């Protein structure tokens, strides 16, 4: 064997040996670090401070929002996004907490565990269910589906994942190939291994002013004077400006495409599969899955709709009378053997205080009360709730 062949052989052997060492290290780390299942850093706080709210979200020692000091089987799990998490609301005003109190007032001593995580969709909701359903064996799992954002996020993710070189796709591949190293990374980043100090509170709205102004400048976004003033005061979530500039027809165009052979119909297929998987694991432990239709303001009243239009969203006039999103969601629930709970009629018929923060768009405390009332009625109609 000549010198060149020996060099090439040694080169590939060294690569193979390196890969083996990394993989062995990965397996050791995976077994050494337990899967904590945290959604957030335990015993931390997130602060929300704008002209509309000045509140803190408390994370318990189990890594999800709430005061819990112990967990019990046979309770209620609620899974969803920021509307479930309770963005901008006091801990006691989040609808999961209000639902627990409502049930308690009827004599049902059931805990409601809030597994909401802002910015998530059905893909993440399935992962949350995998972490908690078999562990806690709940009587009911409530999936809160935001009939605006959740569908569109899946559509955008599916489009993103078509690019195999996308960083998100690469990160997912690395996570699958080296789960132990990924766990170690999460431990080192979020959980401060060996550090028992309580994490500092995170100001979730800290950079809103700078980020929003940059978007307005870079994207050449036109905003009405009243919104622009609030941007300069740091009261506007930059995500609203970003989404309106990228997807002005966001979600409302989705319903027109959903029943055609289109990317939107692929979203329904994926979400139905995720609901089926969550429902199956819930039924395996003797529980039931409830799919709740969570509305955004654009489907409820003209005031909330006009507030969204100020950011540049193009919302059709019939958005506050259509039931197309709920019709499709109810069909998905039926196809997965789940219980469907609608909300649009009660939200649209509500008289009194605003149900959403005018600038931010999330549920107000009044909206949170209404959600708790709707879901409590649905639960109390279930014979096996007692």
Image (cartoon, helix red, strand yellow):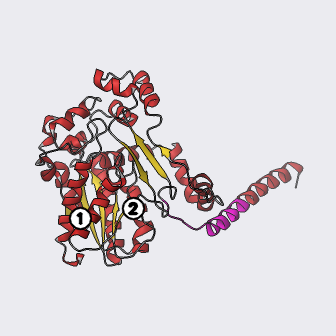
Pinpoint residue 74: horizontal percent, then vertical percent.
34, 76
Q: Residue at x 56, y 52 (%)?
A: 199
Label 1 belongs to which residue?
102
Residue drawn at the location 24% of the way across and 33% of the way down: 307
Along the line of sight, which residue is nearer the eye, 169 or 190? 190
- Quarter the N terminus occupies: bottom right
Q: Is residue 212 above or below residue 324?
A: above
Q: Is residue 256 left or right of residue 89?
A: left
Q: Badge 2 local density, few (<14 within 10 Å), some, or many (20+)? A: many
First to last magenta residue range = 20-38
Asked if the magenta segment contains residue 171, the reply would be no
Q: Secondary structure at mark 2?
A: helix
Judged from the image, the secondary structure of the residue bearing numbered disc 1 is helix
Magenta portion: prevailing SS class: helix
In this view, 385 is above or below 275: below
Label 1: few (<14), some or many (≥20) within 10 Å? Answer: many
386 sits to left or right of 193: left
Q: Give how far across and how far down residue 34 sits, in percent.
A: 58, 68
Q: In whole angstroms, how far apart are the C-alphas of marks 2 and 1?
A: 27 Å
Corner quadrant of residue 9: bottom right
Residue in front for this viewpoint, 297 or 324: 297
Q: Is residue 187 above or below residue 362?
A: below
Of labels 2 and 1, earlier in sequence is 1
The residue wearing badge 2 is 126
The answer to whether any part of residue 159 appears in the image is yes
């Amino acid at each position: 064997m000549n010198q060149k062949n020996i060099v090439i052989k040694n080169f590939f052997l060294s690569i193979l040996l390196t890969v083996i060492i990394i993989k062995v290290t990965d397996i050791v780390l995976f077994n050494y670090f337990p899967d904590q299942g945290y959604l957030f850093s335990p015993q931390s706080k997130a602060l929300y401070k704008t002209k509309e709210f000045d509140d803190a979200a408390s994370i318990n020692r189990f890594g999800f929002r709430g005061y819990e000091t112990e967990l019990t089987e046979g309770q209620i799990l609620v899974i969803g996004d920021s509307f479930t998490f309770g963005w901008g609301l006091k801990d006691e005003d989040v609808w999961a907490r209000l639902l627990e109190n409502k049930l308690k007032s009827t004599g049902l001593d059931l805990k409601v565990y809030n597994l909401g995580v802002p910015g998530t969709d059905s893909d993440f909701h399935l992962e949350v269910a995998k972490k908690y359903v078999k562990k806690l064996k709940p009587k009911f799992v409530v999936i809160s589906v935001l009939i605006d954002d959740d569908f569109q996020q899946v559509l955008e993710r599916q489009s993103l994942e078509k690019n195999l070189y996308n960083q998100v796709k690469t990160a997912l591949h690395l996570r699958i190939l080296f789960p132990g190293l990924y766990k170690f990374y999460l431990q080192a980043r979020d959980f401060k291994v060996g550090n028992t100090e309580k994490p500092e509170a995170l100001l979730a709205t800290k950079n809103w002013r700078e980020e929003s102004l940059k978007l307005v400048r870079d994207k050449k976004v036109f905003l009405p004077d009243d919104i622009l003033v609030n941007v300069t005061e740091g009261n506007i979530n930059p995500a609203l400006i970003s989404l309106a500039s990228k997807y002005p027809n966001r979600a409302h165009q989705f319903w027109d495409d959903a029943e055609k052979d289109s990317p939107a119909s692929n979203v329904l297929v994926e979400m139905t599969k995720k609901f089926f998987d969550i429902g199956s694991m819930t039924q395996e432990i003797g529980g039931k899955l409830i799919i709740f239709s969570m509305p955004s303001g654009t489907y409820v009243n003209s005031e909330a709709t006009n507030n969204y239009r100020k950011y540049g969203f193009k919302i059709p006039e019939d958005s506050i009378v259509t039931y197309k999103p709920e019709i499709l969601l109810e069909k998905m629930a039926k196809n997965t053997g789940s219980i469907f709970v609608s909300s649009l009629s009660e939200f649209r018929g509500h008289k009194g205080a605003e149900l959403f923060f005018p600038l931010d768009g999330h549920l107000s405390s009044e909206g949170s009360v209404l959600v708790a009332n709707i879901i409590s009625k649905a639960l109390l109609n279930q014979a096996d709730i007692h």
